[in-house]
Image (cartoon, rainbow, N blue to C red):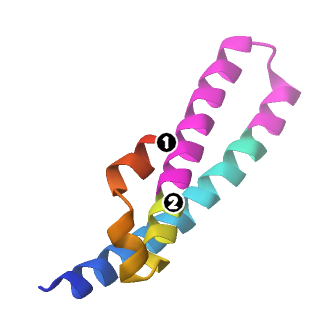
């Protein structure tokens, strides 16, 4: 597998991961609203917030990587992917 094929495969994989993550964020919001109607246990909301933040962080990493893949080869040469992802 050459570099272009690998980039394409990773791009496809990232895109396929992005969609379920978005669904998870939406469903976490729905769950939060429904829980407010039936419980006052604040610890539940702490756990929901942790999961939500981790999902959002994964989403940001994937979106950052997809943006990196969209750059031209010349722009990629100027970028260090590890430094870009460290900012996320």
Q: Which mark is residue 87?
A: 1
Mark 1 burial class by Cα count in 10 Å: few <14, some 14-19, many 20+: few
Labelled pair 2, 1 in contact (Cβ < 8 Å): yes
Residue 33 position within the rendered picture, expressed as x and y whole percent measured from the top left? 83, 37
Residue drawn at x 60%, y 23% is 47
Residue 31 position within the rendered picture, expressed as x and y whole percent measured from the top left? 73, 40
Q: Is residue 35 magenta?
A: yes
Of the numbered discs 2 and 1, the one sitting upstream in the chain is 2
Q: Which mark is residue 3?
A: none
Quadrant position of residue 8: bottom left
Cα separation, mark 2 vs mark 1, equals 10 Å
Residue drawn at x 43%, y 82% is 72
Towards the viewer: 10 or 44:
10
Towards the viewer: 74 or 22:
74
Where disc 2 sits, the SS reads: helix
Residue drawn at x 65%, y 28% is 49
Q: Compared to 66, does 33 lie above or below?
A: above
Q: Which mark is residue 64?
A: 2
Quadrant position of residue 17: bottom left
Q: Compared to 25, does 15 lie above or below?
A: below
Where disc 1 sits, the SS reads: loop
| Magenta-colored span | 32-61
């Amino acid at each position: 597998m050459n570099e272009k094929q690998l980039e394409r495969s990773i791009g496809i994989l990232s895109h396929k991961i992005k969609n379920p993550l978005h669904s998870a964020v939406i469903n976490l919001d729905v769950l939060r609203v429904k829980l407010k109607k039936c419980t006052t246990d604040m610890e539940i909301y702490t756990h929901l917030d942790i999961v939500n933040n981790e999902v959002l962080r994964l989403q940001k990493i994937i979106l950052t990587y997809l943006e990196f893949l969209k750059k031209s080869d010349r722009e990629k040469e100027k970028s260090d992917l590890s430094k870009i992802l460290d900012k996320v």
